[in-house]
Amino acid sequence: MTREGDEHYAAYANGTGRGAIKVTQSGSITTQGCNDQGIRARSHGHGAVTVTQTGDVSTQGATAHGIYARSFGAGAVTVTQTGDITTQGNAAHGINAYSDGAVTVTQTGDIAANGLNASGIVGASTGGNIAITVGPGGTVQGGTGTGAGVRFGYGGGFLPGVDNTLTNRGTVWALSGTAVLGDTGNETIDNYGTIIGKVTLGGGGDVFDNMQGGTFEARETSDFGTGTDLFRNRSGGRVHTATSAGTAETTAFEGLETFQNQGLISTVDGGTGDVFTISNTVGGTDLN
């Protein structure tokens, strides 16, 4: 299916009562215009919203999300994606899912959100928990600017979720360098796959569990925010903090109260002069 022109949704379901909304897409969808979302599913009556996508979605315009799923109320929002999603426009997220209640996104396909301020997956909730699962085998890529691979909430305390989880068994990264972006909720990252870049978390109590077989290709400065935060590198986990032999790189974890290591921490990249610091203060060099 191909749609052209602004605000033309390829698949659109809109509910005004309390009944559930369900959308299943198995073909290919291509849209061209501004706000031309591939799949748009909304409930205005507190009903649950469920979207299952096994085909491919491609959009070109600004705010043309691949999948937009929303409940105006406490209805649970559930998105399952096994196909591929590609977006090109400004603030055109791969998956944009939010509710006043629980939000669940499960992804095993590939997502590439290539535009300015575009994120691969956005989960948002006013008072519910957000659970995002990537892989096995899937790749989630965010765009430039404020884009992230996976994002919880919209920033500034708007729809931040409560107890949020990212379970990664694939690859998460972004053109901006921000792999995971949080807000004021409590974020838990369980990494069994590969996360590339930095994480920027907010005021909640955050936990990054780098599991056996997991790799955090840390870049630049990861900010764990103002809560009480823990990074745990499990046995068989790997934190790698340098990538360019010709550059003396500085990588840092800031705002981190506790760091526990049973795995491997490496700055090996074939060059010299690389520095990795861990601190519970901005600009600090150690855990006080």
Image: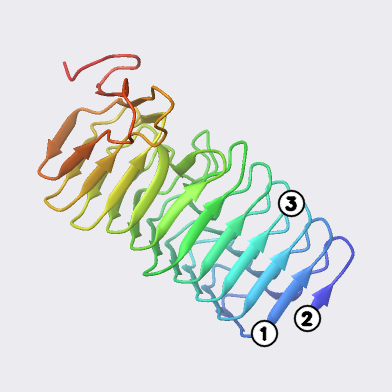
Where is residue 123 shown, x and y percent of the image? Answer: 49, 55
Rendered view: 269 above or below 48: above
Rendered view: 199 above or below 163: above
Helix, strand or loop at label 2? It is: loop
Residue carrying label 3: 89
Helix, strand or loop at label 1? It is: loop
Residue 192 appears left or right of 125: left
* Callout 1 crowding tier (Cα within 10 Å): few <14, some 14–19, many ≥20: few
Residue 223 appears left or right of 83: left
Q: Amino acid at mark 3?
A: Gly
In front here: 244 or 146?
244
Question: Could you tell me if the residues under marks 2 and 1 are in contact, i.e. CB atoms within 8 Å?
Answer: yes
The image's mark for residue 1 is 2
* Callout 3 crowding tier (Cα within 10 Å): few <14, some 14–19, many ≥20: many
Task: Please identify the quadrant where the N terminus is shown.
Answer: bottom right
Residue carrying label 1: 27
Please say whether residue 155 is visible from this viewpoint.
Answer: yes
Where is residue 228 shown, x and y percent of the image? Answer: 23, 31
